[in-house]
Amino acid sequence: MSFVRRAATVLAAATALTAGLALPALAHVTIQPGSAEQGGFTKVTFRVPNERDDASTTKIEVAFPADHPLAFVSVKPVPGWDVKVTEGKLPTPVKTEYGDLKEAVTKVVWSGGKIESGQFQEFEVSMGQLPKDAQQLMFPTKQTYSSGEVVDWSEAPKADGSEAEHPAPLLKLTPATGEDGHAAASASPATSTGASSGAAPAAGSPSVAPVAAGSSPSSSDGTARLLGGAGLAVGVIGVVIALLSLRRRPTA
């Protein structure tokens, strides 16, 4: 028993140490999810944790990229918070699929609410069209506390790959997959199912063959569990009957 208690103590200490080391990384203002497809539209969430024990977060100011302006930006209301979206004229109009873009959102500010110590708040934004010629977008963010302190999350990633002290929320942009790729991926299981069955589905009942073939792994697994459970039940009943018969057997 003493060995078990010592092991539990060591495990608890290791868990606490790991959590303590992870807290600084989790305390940054981040953007979720961290990636989106180039040329598309996306919905992101700015996740803001409160890092101070003696003050609450009262204002969040997110700057939008000026080198790759976004034509469409809308925000989701957050109960208890006021939001202000600021637009500005671009030094040089940017050509888009929808025409020349002369103005774009430059800043979004949430204020009037509170993020208390040990809490976090999420602020959702829908935006696009994302650039096709960029690998990432930075959203420098200022976090204001009730004490008057302002933390500037605006540092770019370091060249050596290490994390900056106050990194800016970063949205990585990946090449667009396209609808054809999704269609091919979704069609491939059905094609392989048809090939393995050795016969094409009957006309007028396209769902019969895919369902039967596609459900075989889960069906066999469920059947095995059912048979196993039934066998266990039969075994228990046999043991009970044997015990009862022993109790009822007359003694010599």
Image (cartoon, grey):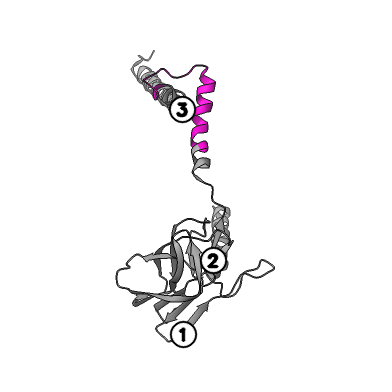
Residue that mark 1 sits on: 149
Does 132 sit above or below residue 123? above
Q: Nearer the viewer, residue 169 or 223?
A: 169
Q: Position of residue 32 (x, y in %)?
A: 47, 61
Numbered circle sitting on residue 137: 2
What segment carries the magenta color? 184-208
Toward the bottom, the furthest residue is: 148
Toward the front, the furthest residue is: 99
Sequence-first disc among 3 and 2 = 2
Sequence-first disc among 2 and 1 = 2
Q: Is residue 123 left or right of residue 167?
A: left
Instruction: Examine the rendering and report whether any part of residue 161 can be seen.
Output: yes
Residue at the spot x=48%, y=27% of the render?
217
Q: Main secondary structure of the magenta part?
A: helix
Q: Give SS at disc 3.
A: helix
Sequence-first disc among 3 and 1 = 1
Nearer the camera: disc 2 or disc 1: 2
Label 2 with label 1: CB-CB less than 8 Å: no
* Residue 187 belongs to the span the image colors magenta: yes
Q: Position of residue 202 (x, y in %)?
A: 41, 17
Query: Given the image, on which type of amino acid does mark 3 rest?
Result: Gly
Does 178 sit above or below residue 155? above
Residue 146 figure quarter: bottom left
Q: Nearer the viewer, residue 235 or 127?
A: 127
Q: Position of residue 244 (x, y in %)?
A: 35, 20
Residue at the spot x=40%, y=78% of the render?
59
Query: Given the image, on which type of amino acid does mark 1 rest?
Result: Glu
Does 173 sit above or below residue 181? below
Residue that mark 3 sits on: 214
Query: Given the image, on which type of amino acid does mark 2 rest?
Result: Leu
Does 235 sit above or below residue 39? above
* Residue 122 belongs to the span the image colors magenta: no
